[in-house]
Image: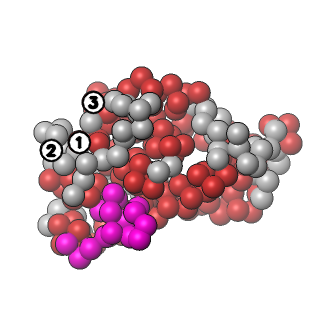
Amino acid sequence: MARIAPLPLDQLPTETRKALAFAEQTMGFTSNDILTMARWPELLGALEQLIGVIYGSDEVDPILKRLMAMVTSSAAGCRYCEAHTAHGAARMAGSEEAKVAAVWDYSTSVLFTDAERAALDLAFAAAQRPNAATDAHFAALGTHFNERQIVEMVAMISLFGFLNCWNSTVATELEEAPLGFARSVLQNWNAGQHTPRGN
């Protein structure tokens, strides 16, 4: 049970309703964390701007960014964000849905390139506490990506640092669409064996 109840839909401010409509169009469902943050509209508005900038940029492949968010959330132990990002990645990936299901084996799966492995290694390391990112991670990234792209990756990881902490702390209740997706597509998700086998 959520520690802070989401705001009922009929109590949402007008601006929040617009944001929620956009989120529903993007994700395909009403997000409980947005409804909880709606209790502080200024916070939600600031976060929406940050999300818009990070998700709106295409310097880094959008599917890779979502896979990085999955790995970040898994390493941080946030099942809510893990299921959300998996659902979002699959909606975007289309024919590449197998890659979403195989993300936990990214270090050995033939579905992933060396560039993707370097990005996912950073996501896995940076989400740990204490932070396990090293110079070696950045050296590996530098062989595949420019500094602007790497900044975008760090921004994505950092965004989910906030969201992982928020949703784990508040115990946000997972919606049916991402929960159903996680149970049906992500191997061993129910058993909790969902930690990426990264470097």
Kindly identify the residue that appears in the image at 36 percent across and 41 percent down.
194
Kindly identify the residue that appears in the image at 23 percent across and 42 percent down.
105
Q: Secondary structure at mark 1?
A: helix
**What type is the residue that disc 1 sits on?**
Asp
Q: Say which mark, if any, is on residue 105.
A: 1
The stretch of residues the image draws in magenta is 122-136
Marks 2 and 3, the one that precedes in the sequence: 3
Q: Secondary structure at mark 3?
A: helix
Kindly identify the residue that appears in the image at 57 percent across and 58 percent down.
165
Q: Badge 1 local density, few (<14 within 10 Å), some, or many (20+)?
A: some
| Count of labels in the image | 3
Front one among 129 and 142: 129
**What type is the residue that disc 3 sits on?**
Ala
Q: Are marks 3 and 1 in contact (CB under 8 Å)?
A: no
Q: Are marks 1 and 2 in contact (CB under 8 Å)?
A: yes
Above or below 143: residue 31 = above
Q: Is residue 52 visible?
A: no
Q: Badge 3 local density, few (<14 within 10 Å), some, or many (20+)?
A: some
Q: Secondary structure at mark 2?
A: loop
Cα–Cα span, label 3 and label 1 = 11 Å
Q: Say which mark, if any, is on residue 108.
A: 2
Q: Say which mark, if any, is on residue 98.
A: 3
Does the stretch in magenta take in 27?
A: no
Cα–Cα span, label 1 and label 2 = 6 Å
